[in-house]
Image (cartoon, helix red, strand yellow):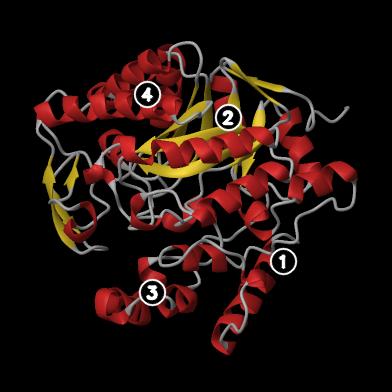
Amino acid sequence: MDSQIFTPCQIGPITLRNRSIRSAAFENMCYGNKPSQDLFDYHTAVAKGGIGMTTIAYAAVNRSGVSFDGQLWMREEIVPDLKKLTDAIHAEGAKASIQIGHCGNMTHRSTCKCKPVGASGGFNLYSPTFVRKLKEEEIYGLVKDFGKAVNLAREAGFDCVEVHAGHGYLISQFLSPYTNHRHDQFGGSLENRMRFMQLVMKEVLEQAKDDMAVVVKVNMYDGFKSGMQQDECIKVVQELERLGAHALVLTAGFVSKAPMVVMRGAMPLKTLAYYMDFCKFWWLKLGLKIAGRIMIPTVPYKDLYFLETAKEFRKAVKMPLIYVGGVCSKDQMDEVLNSGFVAFQMARSLVNDTQFMNRIQDGSISKSACQHSNYCIGRMYTLEMKCHECVENLPCKLKKEIEKAEAATEKSNQ
């Protein structure tokens, strides 16, 4: 079949120049919760590198939804800087998307400036902190915050919003029986657990009007026994189709329970601990040293690791679906598109080389040089996301960890 990679792609009211999208992998470049020069430089480089659309990662819809100091939260004062970014992305011929969401229970009072909230109350071991259950009136207020975030995104020049409904963030916390123990209209049956998502989607689509695309990132499974399984997730996807989402990004995993289901491979524990401030994260550094592999178990990496499951979802709905998960080569891009997906998302290949899509198009390469050591992931929890090949004077222990992880990736792909 003729390659579709560099053909135009329609998502709702917008047209991308090709089928590639930079996924909303957290950059940790929004120091003080606002856009930075690093964020500007990175996304404009990706746009210049030939991507169809680049996605600014995880912007919280309000202050309580912030989980990192280097993460955006949507407010009027950051709109001018975001507009400079989208103007620069557009000047390079790419579209600009922003992922909006709320972290729910995955934060700490020192970061979100209030007691963390979630679908249900409890204790977050990873922060560590107590979490309180959202009141019904607060839920409706959060729905409005999603709508306000869409309007701010339009004002800032974005073509698309990506609603984060996966990975154990707030919408996902309502959907999953693992985190939703409510006994009101928002808990219990799947129909009730979907209610918050339904309200958010109706608000987002209403505010997006007919000039912005609305994409939803949603789980195909949570990745553990007490979480959402594939059968329920198919029903969620079918509901999102009924509600009118323009496209879905199919993913999986729960960052507080099964994080490597999302990214695959091993979490680089030495890298993760090395960059953490001991005074601020002594408890986590100690926990990683004692029981790191129990806390964050390895899930073997292989290219296109979600594709077979995503094909089952392709059969269940007619709407446009976007594939994400281990897209590393031209042949893999073609395989995804020939399997009925309208586009594909990538992150690690574009952290390794912002010119990746241009090099694929001109034929100078056919596969990413990224070997999925996950150094960039271990680093991003403390510093800006960066490939180890762009970092000088790495300690020997980190180099050895990278070599070991790259060897494991090569073996798993044989």
Callout in the foreground (4, 1): 4
Q: Amino acid at mark 1?
A: Glu
Q: Is residue 310 left or right of residue 142?
A: right
Decide if residue 399 is in sight here.
yes
Looking at the image, is mark 1 or mark 2 earlier in the sequence?
A: 2
Looking at the image, is mark 4 or mark 3 earlier in the sequence?
A: 4
Looking at the image, is mark 2 or mark 4 earlier in the sequence?
A: 4
Q: Position of residue 186 (x, y in %)?
A: 18, 27
Q: Specify the label residue 292 is tagged with.
A: 3
Callout in the foreground (4, 3): 4
Looking at the image, is mark 3 or mark 1 earlier in the sequence?
A: 3
Residue highlighted by disc 1: 410
Q: Mark 2: which secondary structure?
A: helix
Determine the CA span between mark 4 and mark 1. Answer: 45 Å
Callout in the foreground (2, 3): 3
Determine the CA span between mark 2 and mark 4. Answer: 34 Å
Q: Amino acid at mark 3?
A: Gly
Q: Specify the label residue 151 is tagged with.
A: 4
Mark 1 surroundings: few (<14), some (14-19) or many (≥20) residues within 10 A: few
Callout in the foreground (1, 2): 1
Determine the CA span between mark 4 and mark 3. Answer: 41 Å
Residue highlighted by disc 2: 312
Q: Mark 1: which secondary structure?
A: helix
Determine the CA span between mark 2 and mark 3. Answer: 33 Å
Q: Is residue 43 left or right of residue 349?
A: left
Looking at the image, is mark 4 or mark 1 earlier in the sequence?
A: 4
Determine the CA span between mark 3 and mark 1. Answer: 23 Å
> Residue 297 falls in which quadrant of the image?
bottom left
In which quadrant will I find the C terminus?
bottom right
